[in-house]
Image (tube, helix red, strand yellow):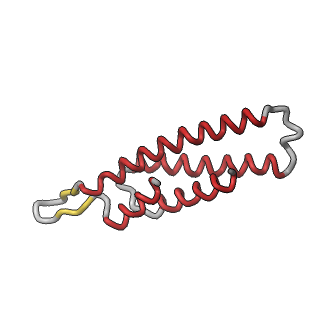
């Protein structure tokens, strides 16, 4: 379970970081969730790897459930925000009357879809 959180958190982190950010507030939260969940899963893994779990009197089953439950809630919120950013692909950003550019380019649209999934 830890390896999948680290792997998918790293992938989301890379995908979101590789795009131009049209809405910094939305994608900033996605990056915060991905980086924080990645870091906390590394810490959680190290606690078990180095044997600190035996020294700390905590119900680790409950702690694992709370960690993964809160991570699910935060990732689901990040998914909704990333999907909202992705949905801006069809809206033009009008700079003047002769030139129209999209808020999210086709390449960034594909990366945003991958990050949303």
Q: How many marks?
A: 0
Residue drawn at the location 56% of the way across and 41% of the way down? 72
Residue 85 spot, x, y in % from top left:
36, 51
Left or right position of 7 against 107: right
> Which residue is farthest left?
97
Residue drawn at the location 68% of the way across and 50% of the way down? 1
Quadrant housing residue 113 = bottom left
Residue drawn at the location 18% of the way across and 57% of the way down? 94
> Which residue is farthest bottom?
107
Q: Is residue 76 above or below residue 34?
A: above
Left or right position of 23 against 94: right
Quadrant housing residue 64 = top right
Left or right position of 60 against 112: right
Residue 38 spot, x, y in % from top left:
63, 51
Left or right position of 68 against 79: right
Residue drawn at the location 80% of the way across and 32% of the way down? 58
Q: Is residue 12 above or below residue 32?
A: below
């Amino acid at each position: 379970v830890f390896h999948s959180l680290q792997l998918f958190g790293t992938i989301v982190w890379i995908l979101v970081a590789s795009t131009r950010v049209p809405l910094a507030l939305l994608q900033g939260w996605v990056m915060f969730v991905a980086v924080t969940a990645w870091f906390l899963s590394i810490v959680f893994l190290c606690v078990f790897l180095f044997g600190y779990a035996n020294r700390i009197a905590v119900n680790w089953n409950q702690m694992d459930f709370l960690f993964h439950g809160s991570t699910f809630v935060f990732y689901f919120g990040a998914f909704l925000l990333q999907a909202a950013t992705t949905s801006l692909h069809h809206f033009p950003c009008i700079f003047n009357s002769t030139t129209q550019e999209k808020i999210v380019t086709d390449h960034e649209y594909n990366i945003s879809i991958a990050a949303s999934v």
